[in-house]
Amino acid sequence: MTRPGFKRILLKLSGEVLMGDQGFGIQPETVARMAQEVKAAKDAGFEICLVIGGGNIFRGMAGAAKGMDRAQADYMGMLATIMNALAMQNALEQIGVDTRVQSAIQMDQVCEPVIRRRAERHIEKGRVVIFAAGVGSPYFTTDSGAALRAAEMKCDALFKGTSVDGVYDADPKLVPTATRYESLSFDTVLSDNLKVMDASAVALCRDNNIPIVVFSIREDGNLARVLAGEGTATIVTNKN
Ligand code: UDP
């Protein structure tokens, strides 16, 4: 399947990609490398909305598993995503990419609140908009935040940068014979419970016809390659 051309994309990076080999937190060299990936995509003419997770710092489910109130733990997770967004903003601005952070949890001293029309203006001016704090409510994840922002910002596709180069029929780290899908339908992802994104995020993309492109962010220059229709990735669309 040839990949369609896109102009405006939403890039979702999980918090884990910022921690590098540290196992926790934010590794500045890794954040700088991610910023280079975003810059290369920007230089290639793409409009970029960015959503970063918080799993490198705190996940609500992990807190709840240790006895915390789930909603309270989820709010902590959302705050973690704001820290990651600020780290990425810093790294991007250090290499000359203009950015704005908009958070779904208002934090006036450090970033803007989410205002769609303002975000639109930032994009028109060539800035990268980093959306933090997911959807701003507990019991959600940043995958759902990414799908929501992709829909409201009318992005042509949602690019999910992970540590594997697409969607496989089994976990390629555990099953050596696992095979990668070139393309998939949203319905197959949901019915076969394939680990692409949360079901609510996948359903939102399906209902709004936003393709999801799953690719590896670990190889240098891969985002630009995948955006150019090269490199390995799996594309999830409404086509069967
Ligand atoms: N979170 C939330 N609502 C949202 C987005 C995030 O409650 O809309 C919390 C949730 O606890 C989640 C944590 O923030 O575990 C970090 O986000 P996520 O797990 O999506 O990060 P990722 O796995 O992408 O690093």
Image (cartoon, rainbow, N blue to C red):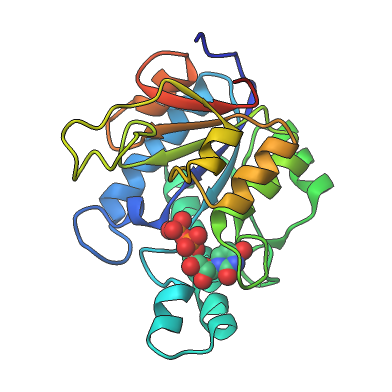
Rendered position, 72 above or below 148:
below
- Identity of the residue drawn at 35% across and 36% down: 217
Q: Nearer the viewer, residue 172 or 103?
A: 172
Rendered position, 211 above or below 95:
above
Residue 70 percent across, percent down from the top left: 54, 82
Give the residue at the far right of this rendering. Answer: 117
Q: Nearer the viewer, residue 11 or 115?
A: 11
Is residue 100 something one can see in this rendering?
no
Residue 147 percent across, percent down from the top left: 64, 45
Residue 210 percent across, percent down from the top left: 67, 32
Give the residue at the far top of this rendering. Answer: 2
- Identity of the residue drawn at 19% across and 30% down: 177
- Identity of the residue drawn at 43% across and 21% down: 226
Rendered position, 229 above or below 137:
above
Quadrant in the rendering for residue 74: bottom right
Left or right? Give the position of 211 relative to 32. Answer: right
Residue 56 percent across, percent down from the top left: 36, 64
Rendered position, 79 above or below 27:
below
Is residue 214 something one can see in this rendering?
yes
